[in-house]
C-alpha cells in the first residue's frame, strides 16, 4: 500500500442491466471500470437495539478511496482485490452512496467516501 492508513485495493465495476433473459428475468451485467484503487474499508457498527431484539440488520461499510476524481455511481459494485489475506478478499460490495470532497479534482488530497453493503447474488453470469 502506498499511503498510510489504506488497507486494501479494490476493483470497481460499472453495473448495468442487459436485455431480459429467456424467462423474462433482468440480466445484470458488470464491466470493470477501475482497477487497483487504493482504499480503506471499514465496517460500520450495527444498530445494537435491533440486534438485541433479534432482528436481522443490514451490515454497512464505509470506504475511503483515492484518487477522488473517479466517476462512481450508486448501484455500482467493487471487489477487494488485494491483499490476499484481507478479511474481505474476493468479496463484492454494492455502493449505496457516493460523497465527493470539496477539493479540486486535480488536488492530490482529493478522495471519495463510499457507503456500501455486501452484494450477494443467487444467480449470476458475470
Image (tube, rainbow, N blue to C red):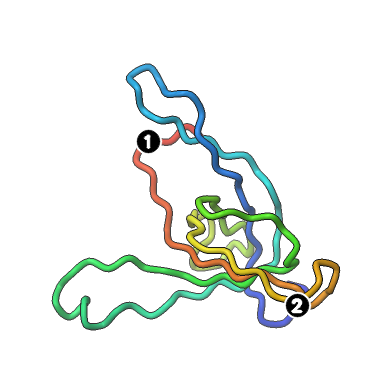
Point out residue 85 in the picture as x, y percentages from the top left corner: 56, 66
Q: Where is residue 50, by image quadrant?
A: bottom left
Answer with the quarter of the image where residue 101 lies. bottom right
Residue drawn at (73%, 67%) of the image: 68
Residue reaching furthest to the left: 53
Q: Residue at x 79, y 78 (%)?
A: 109
> In terms of depth relative to the viewer, which is nearer, 25 or 35?
25
Q: Give the total of numbered labels.
A: 2
Query: Against 22, is 25 above or below?
Result: below
Q: Using the image, tell me which numbered label, if any, was put on residue 54.
A: none
Q: SS for tag 2?
A: loop
Q: Which residue is mark 2?
A: 3
Dividing the picture into quarters, in which one does residue 32 lie?
A: top right
User: How would you rate the neighbour count of disc 1 (Cα within 10 Å): few for under 14, some for 14-19, many for 20 or more?
Assistant: few
Q: Secondary structure at mark 1?
A: loop
Dividing the image into 4 quarters, which one contains the N terminus?
Answer: bottom right
Q: CA distance from mark 1 to mark 2?
A: 37 Å
114 over 13 or under it: above or below: below
Task: Give x and y (percent) for residue 93.
Answer: 49, 57
- Asked whether the beta carbons under mark 1 and mark 2 sit within 8 Å of each other, the answer is no
Q: Which residue was labeled with disc 1?
A: 123
Farthest top residue?
A: 22
With respect to residue 54, does 48 lie above or below? Answer: below
Badge 2: how crowded within 10 Å, few (<14), some, or many (20+)? Answer: few
Mark 1 / mark 2, whichever is N-terminal = 2
Viewer-side residue, 69 vs 118: 69
Q: Nearer the viewer, residue 53 or 6?
A: 53
Residue found 38% across the figure and 80% down from its top? 45
> Residue 54 location, x and y as percent?
15, 73
Amino acid at each position: 500500500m502506498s499511503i498510510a492508513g489504506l488497507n486494501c485495493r479494490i476493483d470497481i465495476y460499472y453495473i448495468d442491466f442487459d436485455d431480459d433473459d429467456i424467462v423474462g428475468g433482468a440480466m445484470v451485467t458488470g464491466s470493470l471500470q477501475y482497477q487497483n484503487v487504493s482504499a480503506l474499508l471499514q465496517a460500520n457498527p450495527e444498530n445494537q437495539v435491533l440486534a438485541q431484539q433479534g432482528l436481522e440488520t443490514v451490515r454497512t461499510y464505509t470506504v475511503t478511496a483515492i484518487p477522488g476524481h473517479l466517476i462512481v455511481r450508486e448501484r455500482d459494485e467493487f471487489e477487494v482485490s488485494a491483499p490476499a489475506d484481507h478479511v474481505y478478499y474476493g468479496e463484492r460490495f454494492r455502493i449505496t452512496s457516493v460523497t465527493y470532497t470539496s477539493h479540486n479534482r486535480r488536488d492530490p488530497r482529493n478522495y471519495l467516501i463510499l457507503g456500501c453493503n455486501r452484494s450477494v447474488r443467487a444467480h449470476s453470469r458475470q
